[in-house]
Amino acid sequence: MDVKSTFLNGVLQEQVFVEQPPGFILRGHEHKVLHLLDSSLIELGFQRSTSEHAVYLRGAGDRRLVVGVYVDDLVITGGNNTDISKFKEEMRSTFQMTDLGLLRYYLGLEVSQTEVGITINQSAYAAKILENAGLAGCSPSHTPMESRLKLSKSSSAPSVDPTMYRSIVGSLRYLVNSRPDLAYSVGYISRFMEKPTTEHLATVKRVLRYVAGTLHFGCHYKRKKEAQLIGYSDSDLAGDIDTRKSTTGVVFFLGGNAGTISLKIDNESAIALSKNPVFHDQSKHIDVRFHHIRECVEENRVQLQSIGTVEQLAYIITKALGHERFCQLRSKLGVYNVQQAH
């Protein structure tokens, strides 16, 4: 839905700053702006999400209503159509509203909804990234990164414009919303924002060429009445050549049958450490907060399952892989060409 009365003067050429009015300034928050929709939604019984302040929630279970707010646009979802219709009427009684129907486009996200499921992609946004980077129509690459590529922050290669580098990488980071196959490569090139060189930029261009070859790829979410949360966890173990830090990746799927959360790991030692208190006593050099998963296992909130390397789907977000393995895992993540699917 769109709030018609938000902008009454059309497109503004000036920069407009809205300050808190005298007498209503919150101490310690003097420089923050006010949101009119916030108070209205609170009055309607919504609670603002503590992790995402633009998301509001009301009700629970099948009666849960979730509203996303961006300036004058509302994205509404829930498990009960009657509740959604009621909320729309509540908003119409307060604001002049336009019901835009099913969500099709929102902040660069292209959405297709059918009886089978929901597909999201960012094809137009991705094409704009390529155009701004001067790579529209470039030769595509089959993978976003060269297998086993290792770069350093202390590269001796010539420097490049950091503003340009950050702009491209920042745009790619938003593209990851619908492209989990880009998560590792974009996260990797984000490490070199401070002092990028031609080596780093070459890797960025490789990512862009992969985007060019997969322009219409996106994610598909199947409709399921019951769902089980299953996670895959992997780590490259001290793979950063500058800091010796590890890159950890997790992938979660919601679908299947109801039950305890299953976390699939290809590291037997990690599973043993989470289950055996003797091993825990021998590893007190590890900070206590890292043993939270052990408590979850003891309380039967999480089940750890050992899987082989071939079945480890989280590999794609912790390592640069070869073409065949990369495409195999990409498909299992549910990322595919949405144009061919239609």
Image (cartoon, rainbow, N blue to C red):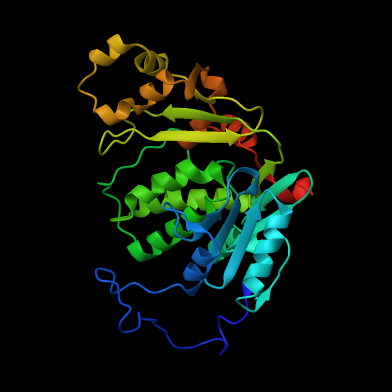
Q: Position of residue 219 (x, y in %)?
A: 64, 45
> Does residue 172 lie above or below 314 as drawn?
below
Residue 166 vs residue 36: left or right? left
Q: Residue at x 68, y 33 (%)?
A: 226
> Does residue 283 lie above or below 157 as drawn?
above
Q: How many marks?
A: 0
Quadrant, the N terminus: bottom right
Residue 72 visible from this viewpoint: yes
Residue 150 vs residue 182: left or right? left
> Does residue 331 lie above or below 188 as drawn?
above
Q: Position of residue 316 (x, y in %)?
A: 51, 34
Q: Which quadrant of the figure has residue 268? A: top left
Residue 136 visible from this viewpoint: no
Q: Position of residue 64 (x, y in %)?
A: 60, 49
> Does residue 164 lie above or below 298 as drawn?
below
Q: Which quadrant of the figure has residue 74? A: bottom right
